[in-house]
């Protein structure tokens, strides 16, 4: 076993991980930082984000407006102290990114351009054409190269956190190239490993997003918060799950059913033409748009494709010049994968699992319940997203809270006294090594990893999809419990050490099953409808009982224990979520009363 001693270990080299590493290097240049990444940094999933990052910059916008949109968009399950901090820091982080070289798209006057995004009543989404995540990740990666204290360990699969007496001590990882086990001993650890969309069968998420960091923290004793809230993005390509950015609708695209009708006007999302507050139908929040698709499907108004039901995304009226300027990647994706050039024909799309609002429970400084362990990005739930994340808040979130995680992890590493636990930590690391050896030693292959994974994904879609009910969620929980008990029946076909993806598949499946169980049991316990969690058997939002975060606690071979934590309310009491015409009507009544 290789041993690396460092001050701060960062698990993940996407946007949150790189931003955290830079913050450590800036805050404490004398501290060593080990960035341990499952893939090369430029293969991290941040690179796939297209639309943009939210931050107040326009004169007619305000921090209060961004706060209100975020809290109402999250159906009042957001911690409002975290949202206040987030909206205030967002423009500063985005400006800093520009100073580091991020090529934001510009207005004719030369300022940073913005586009509308769903659920935001004012334009505040900074963008770089439709490759915003690509440019953000490149900017962060290039900036990280300036700091000699940052050392990268690319293509290392993190398998377990090392924790002793309530304090983190490092992480054990497998070097994918050689199969060798490495122990990274660290005073503080930052988990920035991304989400877990791959527990579902149809997702925008890349193959690497298997919930590894969530599962490691969960097994170590940190609760997973609000896991039942899973975001479906309304415009994924059928068959592949590839995302067509919300920027398509931000630039003025239409969603139509098989009759060519802009059906969103039937679901409380406004008139076909923009309202006085510029909140027309297609720019409703993602949960509402995905739910509207489900209802259209029940009515028989969707389009039958070889890959399932779909509706049309119509961009033709935007014209070729605007599409080529603002949405060149979208045109390439639609043409390449659907043979549908959006300049000339509508593109079939359907809702697809995109983002997890839940994750590792942290406070506003990215701290977890384990001393020295921090988390940021999609793997964490701080929580600014509540029951439904607004598009373009996530890229800003990984900057704001990646920065905070790095600063506080650096401070902890500087302040903490050396721990007298070397022997115990070495024993833990050896246990992790033996676990891998046990998998190699299995001879009889009773179960197929691929079959178990497929069964898991199908069960999640059936029981924890856009709409849920008690019977289907219970069936999913039972299936997941059965799969957990069958998992030790898997064995390796490939017994080699070098690039053994067979081994990684088993470890990833273990992680996904633990995340899936926390999600399903949290959904079963929440007998209300809120945001992206919609129950057919409990259709109303219940603020009296469920204005609380769900907290899933790990219990080994047993189902997770679900507890609750109060939501932090600072200035916005729960209200009605209104968009489009309904919001205008209410605003007019208020104005008349005044």
Image (spheres, rainbow, N blue to C red):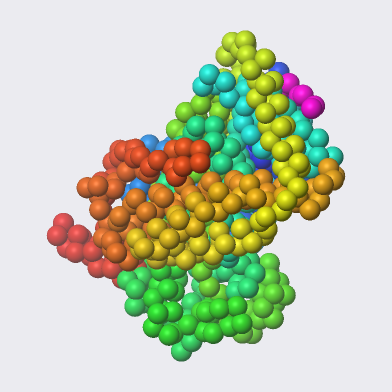
The residue sitting at 55% across, 49% down in the picture is: 484
**Residue 107 percent across, percent down from the top left:** 59, 59
**Residue 34 percent across, percent down from the top left:** 72, 29
Question: Magenta span has 169?
Answer: no
Q: Nearer the viewer, residue 354 or 535?
A: 535
Query: Can the viewer see residue 110 in this picture?
Result: no
- The residue most toward the left is 593
Q: Is residue 344 above or below residue 193?
A: below
Dividing the picture into quadrants, the one containing residue 438 is top right
The residue sitting at 48% across, 82% down in the picture is: 302
- The residue most toward the bottom is 259
Query: Can the viewer see residue 332 in this picture?
Result: yes
The main secondary structure of the magenta stretch is strand
Magenta stretch in the rendered image: 1-9
Question: Magenta span has 4?
Answer: yes
Q: Quadrant of the N terminus?
A: top right
Q: Nearer the viewer, residue 566 or 480?
A: 480
Q: Nearer the viewer, residue 45 or 158?
A: 158
Q: Is residue 478 above or below residue 99?
A: below
Q: Is residue 162 above or below residue 480?
A: above
**Residue 326 percent across, percent down from the top left:** 63, 66
The residue sitting at 56% across, 41% down in the picture is: 215
**Residue 206 percent across, percent down from the top left:** 66, 57
Question: Is 76 on the left-hand or right-hand side of 505?
Answer: left
Q: Quadrant of the C terminus?
A: bottom left
The residue sitting at 57% across, 69% down in the picture is: 236
């Amino acid at each position: 076993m290789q041993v690396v001693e460092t001050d701060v270990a960062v698990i993940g080299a996407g946007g949150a991980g790189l931003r955290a590493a830079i913050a450590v290097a800036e805050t404490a240049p004398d501290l060593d930082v080990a960035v341990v990444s499952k893939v090369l940094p430029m293969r991290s999933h941040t690179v796939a984000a297209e639309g943009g990052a939210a931050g107040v910059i326009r004169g007619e916008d305000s921090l209060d407006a961004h706060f209100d949109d975020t809290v109402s968009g999250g159906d009042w399950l957001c911690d409002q102290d975290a949202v206040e901090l987030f909206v205030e820091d967002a423009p500063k982080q985005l400006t800093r990114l520009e100073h580091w070289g991020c090529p934001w798209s510009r207005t004719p006057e030369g300022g940073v351009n913005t586009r509308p995004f769903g659920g935001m009543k004012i334009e505040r989404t900074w963008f770089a054409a439709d490759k915003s995540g690509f440019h953000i990740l490149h900017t962060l990666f290039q900036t990280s190269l300036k700091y000699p204290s940052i050392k990268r360990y690319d293509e290392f699969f993190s398998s377990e956190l090392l924790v002793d007496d309530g304090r983190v001590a490092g992480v054990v990882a497998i070097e994918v190239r050689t199969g060798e086990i490495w122990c990274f001993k660290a005073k503080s650890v930052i988990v920035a490993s991304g989400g877990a969309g791959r527990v579902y069968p149809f997702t925008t998420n890349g193959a690497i997003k298997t919930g590894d960091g969530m599962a490691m923290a969960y097994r170590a004793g940190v609760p997973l918060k609000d896991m039942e809230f899973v975001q479906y993005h309304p415009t994924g390509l059928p068959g592949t799950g590839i995302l067509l950015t919300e920027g398509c609708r931000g630039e003025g695209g239409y969603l139509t059913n098989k009759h060519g009708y802009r059906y969103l006007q039937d679901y409380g999302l406004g008139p076909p033409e923009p309202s006085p507050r510029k909140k027309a139908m297609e720019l409703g929040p993602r949960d509402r748009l995905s739910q509207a698709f489900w209802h259209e499907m029940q009515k028989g108004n969707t389009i039958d494709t070889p890959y399932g039901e779909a509706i049309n995304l119509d961009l033709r009226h935007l014209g070729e010049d605007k599409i080529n300027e603002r949405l060149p990647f979208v045109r390439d994706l639609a043409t390449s994968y659907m043979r549908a050039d959006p300049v000339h024909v509508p593109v079939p799309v359907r809702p697809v699992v995109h983002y997890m609002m839940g994750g590792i429970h942290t406070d506003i400084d990215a701290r977890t319940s384990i001393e020295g362990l921090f988390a940021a990005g999609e793997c964490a739930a701080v929580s600014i997203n509540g029951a439904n994340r607004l598009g373009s808040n996530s890229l800003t979130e990984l900057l704001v809270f990646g920065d905070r995680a790095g600063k506080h992890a650096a401070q902890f590493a500087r302040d903490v006294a050396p721990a007298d636990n070397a022997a115990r930590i070495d024993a833990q690391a050896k246990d992790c090594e033996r676990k891998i050896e046990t998998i190699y030693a299995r001879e009889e292959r009773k179960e197929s990893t691929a079959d178990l994974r497929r069964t898991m994904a199908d069960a999640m879609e059936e029981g924890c999809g856009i709409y849920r009910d008690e019977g289907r969620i219970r069936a999913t929980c039972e299936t997941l419990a059965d799969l957990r008990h069958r998992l030790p029946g898997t064995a390796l076909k490939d017994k080699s050490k070098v690039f053994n993806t067979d081994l990684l598949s088993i470890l990833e499946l273990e992680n996904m099953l633990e995340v899936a169980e926390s999600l399903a049991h949290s959904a079963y316990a929440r007998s209300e409808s809120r945001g992206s969690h919609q129950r057919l058997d409990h259709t109303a939002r219940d603020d009296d009982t469920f204005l609380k975060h769900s907290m899933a606690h790990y219990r080994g071979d047993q189902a997770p224990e679900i507890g609750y934590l109060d939501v932090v309310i600072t200035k916005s009491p729960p209200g009605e979520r209104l968009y489009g015409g309904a919001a205008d009507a209410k605003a007019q009544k208020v104005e008349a009363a005044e």
